[in-house]
Image: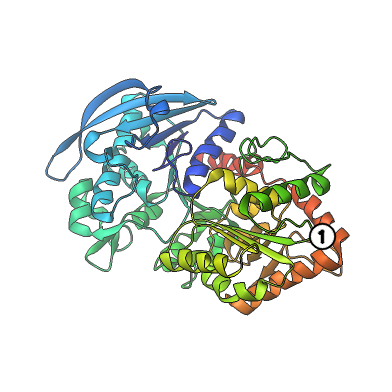
Amino acid sequence: MAFIGSECYPFVKTGGLGDVMYALPKELAKQNCDVKVILPRYACIPEKYQNKMVYRGSFDMNLCSDGRSFYVGIMEYVWDGVVYDFIDNQEFFTNGNPYTNLIDDIPKFCYFSKAALAALNYMDWEPDIIHCHDWQAALVPVYLDTMFKDTPIGRAKTVLTIHNLRFQGVYDKKMISYWTGLPDYVFNKDALTVKWLDANMLKGGLTYADAITTVSGTYAWEIQTPEYGEDLDAHLRYHSGKLRGIVNGIDYDIWNPATDPRLANNYDLGNVLTEKRKNKKALQEELGLEVDDGKFVIGLVSRLTNQKGLDLVNEILPQLIDGNTQIVILGTGDAQYEDSFRYYENAYKGQVCSNIMYDETRAHHIYAGADALLVPSRFEPCGLTQLIAMHYGDIPIVRETGGLKDTVEPYNEFTNWGNGFTFDRYESGLLLDAINRAKTLYFTNRWCWDEMVQRNMDKDVSWESSARQYRDLYVDLTR
């Protein structure tokens, strides 16, 4: 099978898509699938990977409606049982960042979608399944059903995964028609066209894909409603027969407290209750917080944007500072949140630490040292932070939306069961209530809290079971 997408760890990563493009093919290869991953060869891919790429060939490809053609080079890198083929083109991929602005990105990803399919034909590699991701690769099913129908790869089935419905690749219909060279009949209201004059690349892909997946069962349901559907809810309801949700996993090779080389003290299910305390102390020392084992440490590792519920956090943060609680924030994003969290750090020295940066090592330290992790998102297709948190023995405090609802079972004090604290409506008072319930359990019923920590560490959040569900889907499609 071939995976086609715009980013993949460790070559280039801006979000969860990069993690999935790396971890899912690797896990499928372990389950005896023959996997190829096709990516753009951006200039920003680190030199150490660029230098190991092997030239596999090149050709010219017609792209635009006026017959304008472009060079397609194929550079290959094999790692961990997975073959990575990079589409090389100086014109489209020399910019430092994978995404710049829509005017430049639309032609770039029209080219990439077609070049990926042309490269498969050129290499004489015929996959049974082509699995593409988000709007940047959403034209792949459209091309496959039109211009590539009678080529060797034309019999492949397509799966399109929505990682975040907010981004759809919408632009002027004339421009997308020119840059794709696709036949006029795909530009109709049931496929690519939206609002008469625009074309929507993701919508076209959803129409032509054989199966649509998204990254949690609840999000698959939510995106069929006006509230979360980003203007595609009716289209998704129409295609709901081929839509399903499969929750992401986390890569245990990277996220494993027993072997994580970045931690002050490694720990596992057997010794988490003693060793996690040492990581808390190390975190407090590193960040200049008051060193005290008895404090309740809340972590927040997130992009600082509206989607992530930070307006709620902002409203209640002063009410959390009670002499027993410390808050550690890590992330970058909107200036209003960066500034307000810096302000809180200054106002509550030794109780609040705001790390306005992206630092992978510090993220690992926070997961290992925190007692609870906050994910109060407005919407969350899957969310990886709550899965990492549970695997590191943190208790997640989350809003019941998307993948957060699917992966965090609310704690029930009567049965002493569940693995986190949740709230439903998007209101700061309900977030405060969830945090206070967590603090109450932590300070008044520590053995129940410790049992929940161990339950979370015991929960399987690896890619293995998710990959098996994808594999079953592929098998169903090729029957």
Instruction: Report the residue at 47% width, 43% height from top.
Output: 18
Residue type (three-letter) at the residue carrying disc 1:
Trp
Which x, y percent locates residue 426? 57, 75
Residue 37 versus residue 351 in the image, above or below: above
Q: Does 351 sit left or right of 89 as displayed? A: right
Within-10-Å neighbours for mark 1: few <14, some 14–19, many 20+:
many
Residue 63 versus residue 281 in the image, above or below: above
Instruction: Report the residue at 61% width, 64% height from top.
Output: 349
State which quadrant residue 395 falls in.
bottom right
Q: Nearer the viewer, residue 92 or 373?
A: 373
Which x, y percent locates residue 165? 44, 59
Can residue 377 be seen here?
A: no
Which x, y percent locates residue 254? 61, 38
Task: Give the image's coloring scheme.
Answer: rainbow
Q: Nearer the viewer, residue 216 or 444?
A: 444
Q: Nearer the viewer, residue 414 or 121?
A: 414
- As drawn, which residue projects farthest toward the left? 66
Q: Nearer the viewer, residue 200 or 54?
A: 54
Instruction: Report the residue at 52% width, 43% height from top.
Output: 20
Instruction: Report the residue at 80% width, 43% height from top.
Output: 269
Q: How many marks?
A: 1
Q: Does 177 sit left or right of 218 as displayed? A: left
Secondary element type, mark 1 = helix
Q: Does 345 sit left or right of 441 as displayed? A: left
Q: Which residue is mark 1?
A: 449
Can residue 140 be seen here?
A: yes
Which x, y percent locates residue 283? 67, 50
